[in-house]
């Protein structure tokens, strides 16, 4: 039987633990599989190792939202706005701002 994509990424990570592309890919696979806590764990590791341009922060925020962790989601979106702005991705920064505004409007 062929190994699952998650198993492949986990094996790749074992042989090259510092590979941020593999970490991000593993987080995406965990997200597809609905393994939300694993998404958060792997993305936090990824974000400690690399200067993400903003996308990983949005993914992290979404995972926190799924678990009802609104404060953590807000912090991830705020960090994502900073990263997206720093890397000249104004539409991503604006999307995160709008998400935060919509969340504020719900309160």
Image: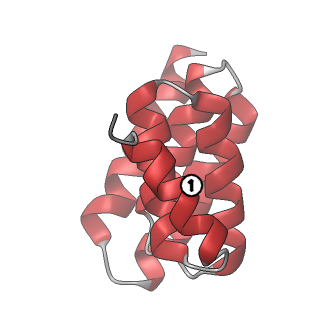
Please give the residue where the numbered disc 1 appears in the rendered image. 10
> Can see residue 76?
yes
Give the colouring mode of the picture. Answer: secondary structure
Is residue 42 depicted above or below 84 in this figure? above
Q: Tell me where residue 2 appears, x and y as whole percent.
A: 33, 40
* The image quarter in which residue 46 lies: bottom right
Q: Tell me where residue 40 appears, x and y as whole percent.
A: 65, 43
Residue at (70% x, 57% y) in the render? 44
Q: Residue furthest left?
A: 91
Quarter of the N terminus within the rendering: top left
Q: Residues within 10 Å of mark 1 (few under 14, many from 20)?
A: some
- Foreground of the two, 59 or 97: 59
Horizontal arrangement in the rendering, residue 15 relative to residue 90 (left or right)? right
Residue at (56% x, 82% y) in the render? 51
Is residue 32 depicted above or below 49 in this figure? above
- Foreground of the two, 22 or 102: 22
- Foreground of the two, 30 or 56: 30
Residue at (50% x, 22% y) in the render? 105
- Foreground of the two, 21 or 77: 21
Q: Tell me where residue 18 appears, x and y as whole percent.
A: 65, 80
- Total number of numbered labels? 1
Q: Residue furthest front?
A: 1
Horizontal arrangement in the rendering, residue 69 relative to residue 82 (left or right)? right
At mark 1, the secondary structure is helix
Quarter of the C terminus within the rendering: top right
Is residue 60 depicted above or below 54 in this figure? above
Q: Tell me where residue 52 appears, x and y as whole percent.
A: 50, 74
* The image quarter in which residue 14 lies: bottom right
> Can see residue 97?
no
Residue at (67% x, 78% y) in the render? 49
């Amino acid at each position: 039987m062929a190994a699952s994509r998650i198993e492949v990424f986990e094996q790749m990570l074992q042989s090259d633990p510092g590979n941020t592309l593999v970490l991000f890919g593993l987080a995406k696979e965990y997200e597809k599989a609905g393994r939300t806590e694993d998404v958060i764990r792997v993305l936090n590791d990824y974000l400690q190792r690399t200067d993400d341009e903003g996308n990983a922060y949005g993914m992290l925020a979404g995972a926190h939202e799924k678990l009802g962790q609104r404060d953590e989601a807000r912090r991830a979106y705020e960090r994502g706005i900073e990263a997206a702005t720093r890397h000249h991705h104004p539409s991503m920064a604006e999307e995160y701002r709008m998400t935060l505004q919509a969340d504020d409007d719900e309160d």
